[in-house]
Amino acid sequence: MECCYRRGNDCAYTVGIHLGGTIENFAHMMNKKASQIGLKNTSFANPHGLDNDNHYTTAKEMALITKYAISNNYINKAMGTRSETINFGSFSKLLTNTNALLKTYEYADGGKTGFTNNANRCLVATATKGDLRLIAVVLGAETTQIRFNTAKEILEETFARYQNTDISKYLDFYINVPVNKGSIKYYERKYKESMQIPLTKDEYNKIYVKQDVMQKIDAPMYVGQKIGKFEVFIEDEKIYEKDIILDQNIYKKTVLDYINEGLRDIFKSENVI
């Protein structure tokens, strides 16, 4: 495995102890965060990533972890820094990013290398071209050069095939749900959101929408209750989901409501010629 000093494993270990009290508790904190961001096939056993049977992930989930991490400006900047001199009083140390793509690939703007005896050579690389930023993940490469070449090939092919695509028209929907014995007859709402995601032309043509909403609302129901959901798919892959939540209380009709309704009906009938 690579030198602990070079990879900062000693620093990761120290941070884990500081934040978690113990390595075991910090790993528990990491797994809790992983679950919160939607990871299902990732398990952490330590803060530094050295080989452990209970420490594993997938290429897809490494990409999701990276996407979450680079939303932090500090991490994003650090991952894209080629080199930096760190000063500690009279001592200084030049730190150099081992992600060679930052020097050899014009669109590269971040990433992280990794190696252990069991995992072999790994890389997460980010690159931006125009308004599209991509994440490529290479795991288990036999050589350092293979991991960089493969990541570059993935990025180049993806830039060629994908472009940011506006799917807002699929996020414009309307509901009108009858209310049974309620103070209102219908619960009616329009929803509209704007969104762009990277898609190929073929994927865009395969988008379809599912709307699953209650056929009727039995009063009473209250603010915050879920009455349905709206989903957008490309074939079997869900790309968008929105729960439909009541934003007003719907009360049962009172005796007075029935009386007023009856009186309105009477006056309407009297005005009919």
Image: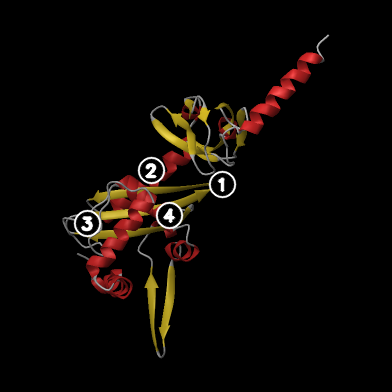
Mark 4 vs 2: CB contact within 8 A:
no
Identify residue type, mark 4.
Answer: Tyr
Q: Mark 4: which secondary structure?
A: helix
In the image: residue 242, left or right of residue 94 = right
Which of labels 3 and 2 is toward the front? 3
Q: Position of residue 228 (x, y in %)?
A: 48, 33
Identify residue type, mark 3.
Answer: His
The earlier-in-sequence mark between 1 and 3 is 3
- Which residue in the structure is indicated by mark 1? 131
The earlier-in-sequence mark between 1 and 2 is 1
Name the residue rendered at 21%, 63% in the picture: 50
Q: Mark 3: which secondary structure?
A: loop
Q: Mark 2: which secondary structure?
A: helix
Which of labels 4 and 2 is toward the front? 4
- Which residue in the structure is indicated by mark 2? 154
- Which residue in the structure is indicated by mark 4? 68
Q: Nearer the viewer, residue 48 or 80?
A: 48
Q: Is residue 86 visible?
A: yes
Within 10 angstroms of label 2, few (less than 14), some, or many (20 or more) residues? some
- The tally of labels here is 4
In the image: residue 227, left or right of residue 168 = left
The earlier-in-sequence mark between 3 and 2 is 3
Name the residue rendered at 27%, 61% in the picture: 28
Q: Position of residue 123 (x, y in %)?
A: 32, 54
In the image: residue 31, left or right of residue 222 = left
